[in-house]
Image (tube, coloured by chain):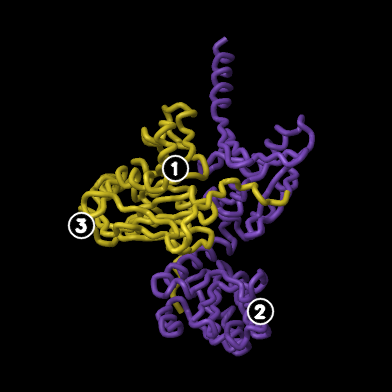
Amino acid sequence: MKKINKNQLSLEITQLFSMAEQYFSEVGEKFEFYERLVSGKKNTLCDAINVNSVGNNNKILESNVEVSHCDPLEDSMYLTVEVNKKNQGNFKFKLKYNKFIPAPFFRFDSVGKTHRNKIDGVSLKELQITPPHFHKFNKEGFEIAYKTEQLKNDETAEALRDINFCFAHFCHESNTRLNDEGFPSVNVMPDTLGFQILDDDPNQNIDF
Amino acid sequence: MKTLEIFKDIQDTFSDLWKYKLRGQTLEIITPYATSNNSFVSVFFTIRGNEYIFSDGGWLSTGEYGFSLIDHLCFQKLFDHFQDSFSVLQTSAKDGTNYYYTKTTNVIDIPSRLFDITLFVQGVINSAAVEFSEGSGISRTLFNSRVNSFLKSNFNNKKMHFNAPLIAGREDLKFNVIYNHTPNIMILMNYITGSTDVNFTNSIWKTNGLFGMAEQSYQKDFIHEKVALIDDSALGFNPSKNATYIEYLQSNTHSEIVKWSERKRLLTLFN
């Protein structure tokens, strides 16, 4: 019989809950490495990311492509594009390097919950970050949300509701390129008749 | 008076936190109330006829706040308490998403209904964030996600259905994995784990029951194999207490018993 290691289990439980709170001590401990992950040049050879199959969640279309990082890394890095089947205006872009932390180390949410950054010395109003927003980690290892200047500006934010404009913005912000120069494009359900589904009203068709 | 000035400033700051977003016929209201995992609670306001309705938008059910509603007695008690205290009603969408809501026909009660649904969502999410250490829920979630990622990295994702019903719509007959080797050959797999002897034994009996029910269903001819995956790293795995139940499971349901430490056997079983 295998010896049960209680310490190991409780460590894993702590990690599971840390995931939920989006805190990773590893990020704080190796913050320079983390910053290099985000800012270092990343490259993909995939010119069109076709998002047309469901992943773990049958309500979400998902596609993963491998990206290479300018620094030699021990393991592969992945870029994930997720699109809600019923509301294609609801999409997420994620960069993952599981060797470091199990959650995405950098991501973008087009819609969803509003994040509260917990930082002293900043007004409460500025700590409330509505979507669309990016997420990254601070030097203490806590995940924070932020808006770029383009997302703060109403006019450019409106243009960024388009998944391809927004994906180019994400690639720019995360220093990701296609073959070292352009940006890859995203095709949502290219296998179907190309009409876009934008069912953004969650209360629609619900029998209250 | 300085404290009064500061109070006014607090009041203004709070007032600035209310935000809204138009979503079709519905208004998303982002409230100033946040959860312990730093999410502001959003509620979804719709007017239908003379009824004013506030829903959670299905967000509790879909895990938008970063937590799933956990299957644990302590959590269930908290959930019921909040639902009862804030008089929150419940309905389901066609896709199975649960919606929690409050409603009124009295204009004067509208802010109160918003208050109720908001505090309900906040209470539920804060409770879901609590670690109920002695329960089975945590180790089960942990084991499930570990196995699922092992399977995803080793097998064809399209053939693998997680937490799936054997017969469409039969929520009472779900298996951790249904593997469709071909449309007519399927393998059922259930995970057995638990952080105490009792939870582990209950998990064995549940699998025993489900495999038995599957054999009595009209799908029985298509079931090629039944696999019970035993979490032998679980605290509740204690051969002196549960080995006889595992033996019974094997002989009663003719299932294949695979220990997690011997998971490489799955590679041959599923191919």
* Amino acid type shown at disc 2: Gly
Q: Secondary structure at mark 3?
A: loop
**Mark 3–mark 2 contact, CB under 8 Å?**
no
Q: Residues within 10 Å of mark 3 (few under 14, many from 20)?
A: few
Does residue B236 sit above or below B211 in this rendering? Answer: above
Does residue A48 sit above or below B111 in this rendering? Answer: below
* Amino acid type shown at disc 3: Pro
Q: Residue at x 54, y 48 (%)?
A: B65
Q: Nearer the viewer, mark 1 or mark 3?
A: 1
Q: Colour of chain B?
A: purple
Residue marked by disc 2 = B209
**Tag 3 subunit:** A
Q: Position of residue A46 (x, y in %)?
A: 29, 59
Q: Residues within 10 Å of mark 2 (few under 14, many from 20)?
A: some
Residue marked by disc 3 = A72
Q: Nearer the viewer, residue A202 or B189?
A: A202
